[in-house]
Amino acid sequence: MSFHDELSLLLRARYPLIYIATREEARAEAAIGRCAEQQGSRSVYIWDFVEGYQGNPNDAGFGRRNPLQALELIEKLPATAAAIFVLRDFHRFLDDIAIARKLRNLARLLKAQPKNIVLLSAQLSVPDDLSEDITILEFPLPTVAEIQTEVERLLSATGSQLPPRTVDELVRSCQGLSMERIRRVLARGIATHGEFQASDIDLILEEKRQTIRQTQILEFYPGDEKISDIGGLDNLKDWLLKRGGAFSEQARQYGLPHPRGLLLAGIQGTGKSLTAKAIAHHWHLPLLRLDVGRLFGGLVGESESRTRQMIQLAEALAPCVLWIDEIDKAFAGFEGRGDSGTTSRVFGTFITWLAEKTSPVFVVATANNIQALPPEMLRRGRFDEIFFVGLPSQNEREAIFSVHLGRLRSHNLTSYDLSRLAYETPDFSGAEIEQAIIEAMHIGFSQNRDFTTDDILEAASQTVPLARTAQAQIQALQDWAASGKARLASRRSSLSNRIQQQIQSEDNS
């Protein structure tokens, strides 16, 4: 149901107190005005703390700097007068006992009158004593059609001529931004060159990064890592290669649904996070990182609101990759937490979205302790596949050494004995191999020479891998994977060379 339809329904059903949390104040008020016109030309009264009531000459300035007086006007109007009262930033006064009591009295009164109070605010803040009286309504970001209309209007007004394909790319780039930000960034490009040019799309991407930073929920990650930077994990790579074109229009015409996502479970330092970054780069999609801990706020309803905001923003930016790192730490054992069920509600909202989303948001969740996750998270339908990422085999360790040394010393890679390095580092994860190379570089640098194979082996001999310090935990993970509950990310076969060649070919293209 669209915002317009939902608001119209609430107005007809005489919901007395409606709370709309949005930073797009002007756009939300315009939407409310359209709903009012379609319902018999209801009068719309807009109030803010500085100016009081605006628009109606008879009440202009009434309630200025007096929120309690602003509510009293609602009672003074005839009981049969149909009206909507939009109160800007009114959340700041809800903790006042007089304001809260007055709103509760009005909520009871307005159930029998064609009047509604709309609290319009940039943030959601509902006190406990008003939670049963207030109905929260989400105001979505601009749709593709709305963005298309606005972009074409601005381009036409400035005489900018862009090819249809560039306009489509421009509209897609603007998804996830508020209408005000879209207008501002387009105006910036026009002010720079006298017209908007295709090269100005980079301005939109930078504005999008700024928007994501301001939410303090999602982070915009640059996708520099390639799938070819991952040593081993051939099963996982093969799975990803087969889905490389799954976000294209040809895939929709074929009847393929959008890929839903992956859950990567396994031992720390084995490349799970690197894989998430490489997927976004390989598929040429923006990468958003979610820190689940940032979803939880101290106010009633704030955590649920942040979760909905995260989902709304991710879907507006689609197609994209949403990376959720160490999801097990956020939702492990939430049943016993003393948070009045907040974590349970956030979890319920999140997994329901995972199962029902139709937008092209590819979710990559990583977990070190898969057994700590609730069973609902592992049910088929939440993710396309669950992969177990274990410790690399000797062949995979050789590939990991080759990746790191090839990046650091591509000119003399052949001077390193890769097979010996792989043989001498059993139970090492990819992260531990990287640290051993860094330590060897310190050894060589301190002696004013290049580091050697022996330096790497010396650094490795001084490292106690996690596989030995957390042996019981890792064995439990391996037993869980061996029971058939997850697909193994690694493959021991001759197909690895073919997969690597295909990856290199796609990376080069």
Image: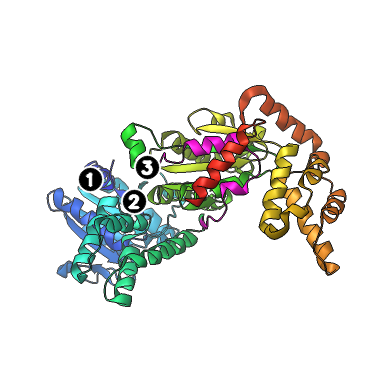
Q: Which mark lies nearer to you, 1 or 2?
A: 2
Residue 62 at least partly seen: yes
Residue at 82% across / 57% down in the picture?
452
Callout 2 amino acid:
Pro
**Residue 121, position as x, y percentages in the image:** 37, 59
Residue 373 at least partly seen: no
Left or right relative to 502: residue 172: left
Residue at 44% across / 55% down in the picture?
125
Task: Answer with the quarter of the image where residue 331 lies.
Answer: top right
Q: CA distance from mark 1 to mark 2?
A: 15 Å
The residue labelled by disc 2 is 140
Q: Which of pointers 3 and 1 lies earlier in the amino acid sequence?
A: 1
Left or right relative to 205: residue 119: left
Query: In this picture, is 146 found above or below 484?
Result: below
Callout 1 amino acid:
Ser
**Local crowd size for mark 1, using a 10 Å CA cut-off: few (<14), some (14–19), many (≥20):** some
The residue labelled by disc 3 is 248
Task: Answer with the quarter of the image where residue 184 lies.
Answer: bottom left
Are discs 3 and 1 less than 8 Å apart at CB? no
Q: Quadrant of the N terminus?
A: top left
**Residue 475, position as x, y percentages in the image:** 76, 31
**Local crowd size for mark 3, using a 10 Å CA cut-off: few (<14), some (14–19), many (≥20):** few
Q: Depth check: give the residue in front, 62 or 365.
A: 365
Q: Which mark lies nearer to you, 3 or 2?
A: 3
Please provide the residue range marked out in magenta.
219-247
Residue at 36% across / 50% down in the picture?
104
Query: In this picture, is 334 found above or below 454?
Result: above
234 within the magenta span: yes
Task: Answer with the quarter of the image where residue 494 lies.
Answer: top right
Q: CA distance from mark 3 to mark 1?
A: 36 Å
Q: Depth check: give the residue in front, 255 or 221.
A: 255
